[in-house]
Image: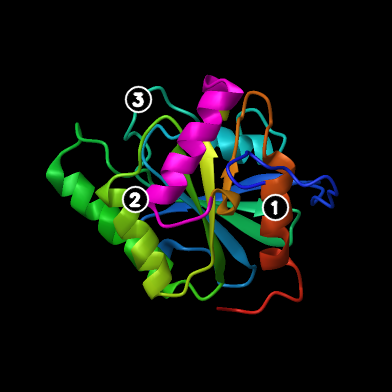
Amino acid sequence: MLGRCYVPQLRLSMIISSSEFVKSAVKPSHYPEEVLPEVAFVGRSNVGKSSLINTLLNRKRLVKTSSTPGRTQLINFFNINKTFSFVDLPGYGYAKVPKSVVKSWGEMIETYLSTRKTLKGVVMLMDIRRDPGKDEQDLVNWFRHHAIPTIFVLTKADKFSNQKKKVHHETCAEALGLSPAEMICFSAKTRLGRDRLLDEIKPWVSEQTNEF
């Protein structure tokens, strides 16, 4: 079913029984101890990252949302089910912040992604309404170069009709050298894609997960 926002008929999604904020960090000395497997979420500012994480966790405001892009400048750690962690990385690509802040964000994100031993994979978010640009292409290539498992998600899928969603889904996939089947269409409003995303995260945080 290439080209469609496909959700498998058979669902064995994780049950999220608990979730809590642990701490914020800007450098490795501030990170929690490397004990639990971690899944990191990364995306452009205002991509809907906080809303996506809240939807996955069935929480309304655990991850703070902001109407001002570029507001989040910290790495935020959340304990899920007391068995694994979600890590909310700072949004990138917002032009109205100082260049010094942009540089520090890039360094902060790269340091975490390249040094964190308990990182099992990354969920990369992109707005379905926006064609992937150089930032997205560079990030995808960086993940490939470092062999970091990645799940690709197109957010705000409820903004389009089914036909328009299909077209943009295919366009985004082609721009990044992916097949449409490799990208999950997601909506925090309708919860489209929630179960599939949890299904794909599940192997990363199970006891059988191998480090990459």
Q: Say whether disc 3 or disc 1 marks the residue closer to the N-terminus.
A: 3
Residues shaded magenta: 158-179
Residue 121 appears in the picture as rendered: yes
x then y, percent, for residue 180 = 55, 48
Residue corresponding to mark 2? 136
Within 10 Å of the Cα at label 1, are there few (<14), some (14-19), or many (20+) other Cα atoms? some
The answer to whether 211 is drawn above or below residue 113 in the figure is below
Look at the numbered discs 2 and 3 and tell me whether their residues touch, using CB distance below 8 Å: no
Look at the numbered discs 2 and 1 and tell me whether their residues touch, using CB distance below 8 Å: no
| 133 and 29: which is toward the camera | 133
Q: Say whether disc 2 or disc 3 marks the residue closer to the N-terminus.
A: 3
Q: Amino acid at mark 3?
A: Thr
Instruction: Give the numbered dot on residue 80.
Output: 1
Residue under the image location 35 percent in, 38 percent down: 131
**Quadrant of the rendering where the C terminus is positioned:** bottom right
Q: Nearer the viewer, mark 2 or mark 3?
A: 2
Q: Is residue 175 magenta?
A: yes
Residue under the image location 35 percent in, 66 percent down: 142
Residue corresponding to mark 3? 68
The answer to whether 168 is drawn above or below residue 37 in the figure is above
Residue under the image location 49 percent in, 29 percent down: 65
Q: Is residue 102 left or right of residue 123?
A: left
| 167 and 23: which is toward the camera | 167
The answer to whether 200 is drawn above or below residue 66 in the figure is below
SS at badge 3: loop
- Prevailing secondary structure of the magenta residues: helix
Residue 156 appears in the picture as rendered: no
x then y, percent, for residue 209 = 70, 74
SS at badge 2: helix
SS at badge 1: strand
Please identify the quarter of the rendering in which residue 81 is found.
bottom right
